[in-house]
Amino acid sequence: MIHIKIKVVNTFLDRELLNHFKTFGFDLIDDIKNSDISRREFESLLKDSERKINGGKKGDNLYRDGIITAYKLKLKDEKHRIGASGGFRFIYLLVLGDINQAIPFHLYCKHVGKNRKNDLTEEEKKQVRKLINSFN
């Protein structure tokens, strides 16, 4: 079996990409504020997600078109001592092919922060499909 190493991108380093995600209703900067975590804690989540993804745990497949798939990955909330089942939901695009990158675009928490929720809304799921289609 061939193992492809996936790099999780720090989306904050690409304003153009952040703005593109915003046009579909996903504002990662607001997500972090609303989730009661710092940028450093977010960067820790990036590292955790990279370990999980490269360990074979990509998360739940939300939508796929061509080489781009959207996934929802469960992550622990270390700050509040909440396990992955009740912690963060890390929504990202997995882009295979020449770049092999995971690009986060939405974050929410089930039990902590301003905008607690159990799952993406139906409207958000539609926007995920539109977002992926915008790259093809």
Image (cartoon, rainbow, N blue to C red):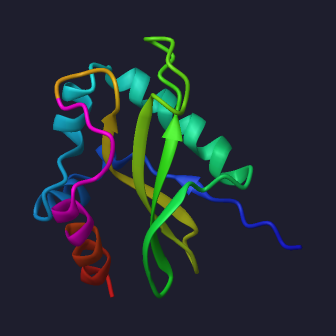
Magenta stretch: residue 119 in it? yes
Q: Is residue 94 left or right of residue 5?
A: left
Residue 64 image point, x, y percent: 45, 79
The residue range painted magenta reads 115-126
Residue at the spot 20% in from the left edge and 68% down from the top edge: 127
Quadrant position of the N terminus in the picture: bottom right
Q: Is residue 20 left or right of residue 54?
A: left
The total number of labels drawn is 0
Residue at the spot 50% in from the left edge and 82% down from the top edge: 67
* Outermost residue, right side: 1
Q: In the displayed structure, would residue 77 be above or below residue 81?
A: below
Residue 18 image point, x, y percent: 22, 54
* Outermost residue, top side: 80
Magenta stretch: residue 2 in it? no
Q: In the displayed structure, would residue 42 be above or below residue 51?
A: above
Quadrant position of the C terminus in the picture: bottom left
Residue at the spot 27% in from the left edge and 19% down from the top edge: 36
- Along the line of sight, the residue nearer the viewer: 107 or 21: 107
Q: In the displayed structure, would residue 46 be above or below residue 132?
A: above
Q: Is residue 130 left or right of residue 118?
A: left
